[in-house]
Image: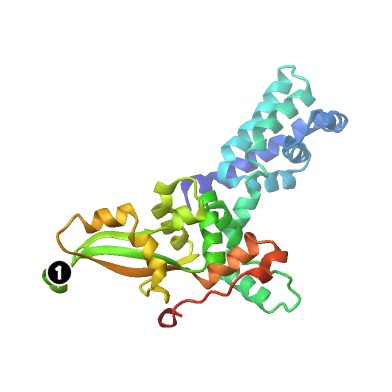
Amino acid sequence: MSERQDRTPAVWEGAAEALPGVARIAGTAWLRSASWVAGSSARSARNLARAMTDPSAAGELVRGVAHDLADATRAISNVATKVSSGVPIPVALFEASVSLTSVIGSDEPERKQRELSLRERGEELLRKSRDVWSEDEAHPAYGRILDEVAPDEARILLLLLRGGPQPSVDVRTGGPVGMVSSNLLSAGLTMIGPRAGVRYLDEVPAYLNNLFRLGLIWFSREQLEDPLEYQVVEAQPDVLAAMHSVRFSKVVRRSIHLTPFGVDFCKTCLVDEEHLGELPTHELPDAEQ
């Protein structure tokens, strides 16, 4: 326990003993002046006024703001000082309540969240899993994912959902030397950007990396069953430039798929229910299921 925490009881006891004297001056006038306080300051003002008439309530007030006892004590001291110097009691209380607004109540949800241990959160999940009447349908991560997906990335997801897995190629060094040691010249070249109609074509590699990070897509080492899918990709300028950058080159065919998690995310968040029946069924290659 810190030195500040060790001093807390003694500091409050002295402040609490002084409160009833202030309360005799302020009690009745405060009740008549409650309309001074509005919005978020209302709660702190009520707590402050109650603390001035009840030492036990004063203790509750300090426990609620134990992380910043100095601010609470200073606010109460300021009220007494202002009243003794002729400031109207309602005005003094209102000003003090405003200063306490950021201390009292504003961090209560955050504090409760900190107090909830990982084990307690796990137990809550298990309790929900046993609740046969629970109506939760969407995965709890979907809301967070929607905040982390760009508009262009949503278009890519719809392409993969409606059009199926997309071809991707790597260009490597080939020839006799390439059979022993092949170097990667260019990776992950696709036609996904143009096919999806994205706005920023140069960002497609970053889009795909983000979708992979979120668990929505999978970069497969397997090629698609139809070799014709790769002809358009291999005729693109960036693929041809990589192939012509060395004397001998070779193209390695791969593919990009939605994960089962990605399929469910798209159906839940990006497709109307009336169109769900029109979607094709996509599966990962047998080796990767």
Q: Is residue 18 above or below residue 119?
A: above
What residue lies at 60% left-to-right and 52% top-to-bottom?
Answer: 111
Camera-side residue: 164 or 14?
164
Q: Position of residue 24 (x, y in %)?
A: 81, 31
Residue on which disc 1 sits: 175
What residue lies at 26% left-to-right and 62% top-to-bottom?
Answer: 171
What residue lies at 73% left-to-right and 25% top-to-bottom?
Answer: 92
* Snapshot quadrant of residue 232: bottom left
Q: Is residue 259 left or right of residue 253?
A: right
Outermost residue to the bottom: 286
Q: Is residue 114 left or right of residue 249?
A: right
Residue 65 visible to an observer of this rendering: yes
* Snapshot quadrant of residue 262: bottom right
Camera-side residue: 181 or 173?
173
Q: Position of residue 180 (x, y in %)?
A: 13, 73
Identify the image's colour scheme: rainbow, by chain, secondary structure or one colour.
rainbow
- For numbered disc 1, what is the local secondary structure? helix
Q: Is residue 59 above or below residue 44?
A: below
Label 1 environment density (alpha carbons within 10 Å; few <14, some 14–19, many ≥20): few
Outermost residue to the top: 86
- Amino acid type shown at disc 1: Gly
Q: Position of residue 59 (x, y in %)?
A: 68, 47
Q: Position of residue 261 (x, y in %)?
A: 54, 70
> How many numbered marks have been drawn onto this rendered protein structure?
1
